[in-house]
Image: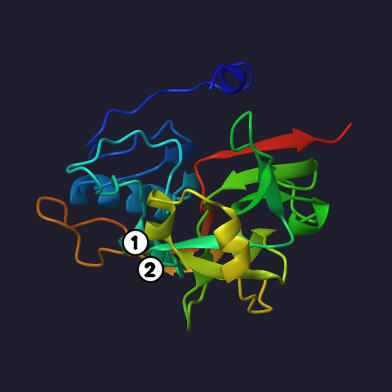
Amino acid sequence: MEQARQLFKIASLKAGIDQIPDDISVLLLVHPKQLPEATLYAIDQFVLRGGKLLVFVDPFSEADTGMQMLPGDGADKASDLEPLFKAWGLRLMPDKVLGDGSYAMAVGMGQSQRPVRHAGWLGLPPRALNQEHVGTAGLESINVATSGILEPVEGAKTQFLPLLQSSEYAMPFEAARFAMLSNPEELLRDLQPTGERYAIAARISGPAQSAYPNGIEGQKDGLKAADNINVIAVADTDHAFAVTD
């Protein structure tokens, strides 16, 4: 955020906000969890009126330090924007973490143990990055941890353009498995690649309908549709990148 402030004028919005101010041109939304309907509607209307949205969701956020309710229970580390995603023609594959044998990173297991490859922690090379899009063309690599999978909704009118993708040697794993994972090598042993390249990030553009065509209580006269929306969705909140020279 400190680096972003050197280039952009940034305003922080309070949790539970019911309207995005008109002077906001780009909305950065990170790890949205249990947003009230009024806030979802505010985001919906912001996008329909031409606002640009960059949203980071995650099926299992390594950066989320939420407490466990009971010993042995997994903390709620997931986020989504399901009602809005559906209206925009995409979805986050529910409760799934992407595993990739080709891009698996080596992780340390302690001073007395050798590093092992972790199929849920991925080092994405240039081939995995969309070299035609301005948002990813200048990047050399991106590391993601327990990222999710984005996919277009069948019949959607919007365009779904993958920006970050897995290799063909990949498959979805149950997100709950990562809460108690002690030996990452188990993932590689169980990996059964589907041959599909899964999208970790995507740009959504084109015509879209409101997720709330009848408005919400107290707000009935909002926008119903837009000819073109501009959304970038990323299915990970734990990542780092390197820029080329």
Judge whether residue 204 can be spotted in this image: no
Residue name at image x 35 percent, y 44 percent: 32
- Residue at mark 2: 86
* Residue 78 percent across, percent down from the top left: 36, 50
- Disc 2 vs disc 1: Cβ atoms closer than 8 Å? yes
Residue in front for this viewpoint, 123 or 136 = 123
Among the 4 quarters of the image, the one containing residue 129: bottom right
* Residue 31 percent across, percent down from the top left: 39, 42
Give the crowd class for mark 1: few <14, some 14-19, many >=20 residues within 10 Å.
some
Residue type of the residue flagged with mark 1 = Glu
Relative to 91, say whether 13 is above or below: above
Residue type of the residue flagged with mark 2 = Lys
Specify the label residue 82 is tagged with.
1
Residue name at image x 70 percent, y 70 percent: 169
Relative to 180, say whether 215 is above or below: below
* Residue at the extreme front: 112
